[in-house]
Image (cartoon, grey):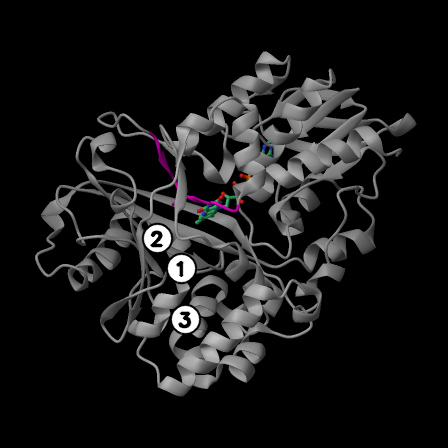
């Protein structure tokens, strides 16, 4: 078949990897000038390795991406350090992992016992379908207790889901607890080296990738063909796979029926913004990741000292810091420029190291993305559109269809490969 793919993120590339291997003719259209989508990187001229625009790591349970890396013959490039992840509570840092170290949290003994018992239940249970019927907010207060919820879980939910935090269902939290591992994975050369290797494998198998080529419309043609238009050309395919956000799919495809469009509109998501800093000195002694509750009045949600995870030697000795937050795309941070964000964020760094000074900043970058984190409400399994759209020959595989697991590159691989199977194995 002649197959078009919109997006050279991990989902689009994973689908293309399988489809080209089976001998199909695959053409990928990518709006950006490089592969990797949300997991793509950038590089300061001084660095040896690329750095992700948004902080990224894998878990040891991320079997789909680990298998794909193995199929690419690149397993020796994957490594799993054990960095320190922490929670900021009442101006002190507490270990976030492993879970048993939560015994050190500043909560009462009764709260610790309830926390341990419900934690064991969640670890052993595999019935997430029952959990999606209740919000994480209600379930956690009911079983873990108000005290633990306020200290531990509410900050996490507010940080990730903003005004939707009471809507998120408990299956999402269950999935998060199930999949976390203490060791976190990374790729030699950065995630971009993996993205590029996957893209190279697709082209080596005969695929074509058009970079800096945004698709402008997707139209249904007679005889179940689908046409993809870019700013300069149109291409007609037997099958098209779009890997873009629900709102973009809506804009690109005017012929979608009204009931499907309202299904797309119901899929809520958050945006993300990060300020990346290259510092001349270390900020914290050992912390890779620090979760910050909104109540502690930091101007961001997470402080990530990447070089406490991956050695600074790959970045010419720079200390790499991400100050990140999940926000609605209407939030005023999205209209602030780099200088304004620096002025807002830098003073907060003194709370991690009183010696910090703005002179420590050698270089900085800002990255913003309006579609970064889908929100899973009650009974979300019923809301998820299938990979096949109502337009014959048009398929859609996005972060919004990943569930109950939290979106991630592992699931982008899984959904991309599932889409390739759906395209080739099932009739229209
Ligand atoms: C802040 C943040 C932190 C994250 N942390 C992690 C992590 O630690 N570990 C992890 O595994 N995952 C993490 N993720 C999630 C991970 O990046 C995504 O789940 C994954 O990259 C999604 O891949 P995708 O291919 O589905 O989508 P995308 O990466 O969004 O790919 C879609 C592609 O379509 C392209 N495109 C858009 N419009 C058009 C158009 N009109 N025409 C052509 N192309 C178009 C885009 O440029 C993009 O390349 C994180 C994401 C964010 C935002």
In the rendering, at what x and y percent does residue 34 appear? 47, 26
In the image, which is nearer the foreground, mark 2 or mark 3?
Answer: 3
Question: In this view of the protein, can residue 34 be seen by the observer?
Answer: no
The residue wearing badge 3 is 155
Instruction: State the image coordinates of residue 32 (x, y, percent, origin top left).
Output: 50, 30
Lower sequence index among marks 2 and 3? 3
Q: Is residue 121 left or right of residue 276?
A: right
SS at circle 2: loop
Secondary structure state at the residue bearing disc 1: helix
Residue that mark 2 sits on: 336
Residue 385 vs 64, above or below: the answer is: below
- Mark 2 within 8 Å of ligand 1, using the beta carbon: no
- Identify the residue at horizontal 54%, vertical 23% (top origin): 72
Q: Report whether 399 appears left or right of 305.
A: right
Rendering coords of residue 306 (x, y %): 29, 45
Check contact, mark 2 vs mark 1: CB within 8 A.
Answer: yes
Does 172 appear above or below 68? below
Reading the image, the residue beneath label 1 is: 332
């Amino acid at each position: 078949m002649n197959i078009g793919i919109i997006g050279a993120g991990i989902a689009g590339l994973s689908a293309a990897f399988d489809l080209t291997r089976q001998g199909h003719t695959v053409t990928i259209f990518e709006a950006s000038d490089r592969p990797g989508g949300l997991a793509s990187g950038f590089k300061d001229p001084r660095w040896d390795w690329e750095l992700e625009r948004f902080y990224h790591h894998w878990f040891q349970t991320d079997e789909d991406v680990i298998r794909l890396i193995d199929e690419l013959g690149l397993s020796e490039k994957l490594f799993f350090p054990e960095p320190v992840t922490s929670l900021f509570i009442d101006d002190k840092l507490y270990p976030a992992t492993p879970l048993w170290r939560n015994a050190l949290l500043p909560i009462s003994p009764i709260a610790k016992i309830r926390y341990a018992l419900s934690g064991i239940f969640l670890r052993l249970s595999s019935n997430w379908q029952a959990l999606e019927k209740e919000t994480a907010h209600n379930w956690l207060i009911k079983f873990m207790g108000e005290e633990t919820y306020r200290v531990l879980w509410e900050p996490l939910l507010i940080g990730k889901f903003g005004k939707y935090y009471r809507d998120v269902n408990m299956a999402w939290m269950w999935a998060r607890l199930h999949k976390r591992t203490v060791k976190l994975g990374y790729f030699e050369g950065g995630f971009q080296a993996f993205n590029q290797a996957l893209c190279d494998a697709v082209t080596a198998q005969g695929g074509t990738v058009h970079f800096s080529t945004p698709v402008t419309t997707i139209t249904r043609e007679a005889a179940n063909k689908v046409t993809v238009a870019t700013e300069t050309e149109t291409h007609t395919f037997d099958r098209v796979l779009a890997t873009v956000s629900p709102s973009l799919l809506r804009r690109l495809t005017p012929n979608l029926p009204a009931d499907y469009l309202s299904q797309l509109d119901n899929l809520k998501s958050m945006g993300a913004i990060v300020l990346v800093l290259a510092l001349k000195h270390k900020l914290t002694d050992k912390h890779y990741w620090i979760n910050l509750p909104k109540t502690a009045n930091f101007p961001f949600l997470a402080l990530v000292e990447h070089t406490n995870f991956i050695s600074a030697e790959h970045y010419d000795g720079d200390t790499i810091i991400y100050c990140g937050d999940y926000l609605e795309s209407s939030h005023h941070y999205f209209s602030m420029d780099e200088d304004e964000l620096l002025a807002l964020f830098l003073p907060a760094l003194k709370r991690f190291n009183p010696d910090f000074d703005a002179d420590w900043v050698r270089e900085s970058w800002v990255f913003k993305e309006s579609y970064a984190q889908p929100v899973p409400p009650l009974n979300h399994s019923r809301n998820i559109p299938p990979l096949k759209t109502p337009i014959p020959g048009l398929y859609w595989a996005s972060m919004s269809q990943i569930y109950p697991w939290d979106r991630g590159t592992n699931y982008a691989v899984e959904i991309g490969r599932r889409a390739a199977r759906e395209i080739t194995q099932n009739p229209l």
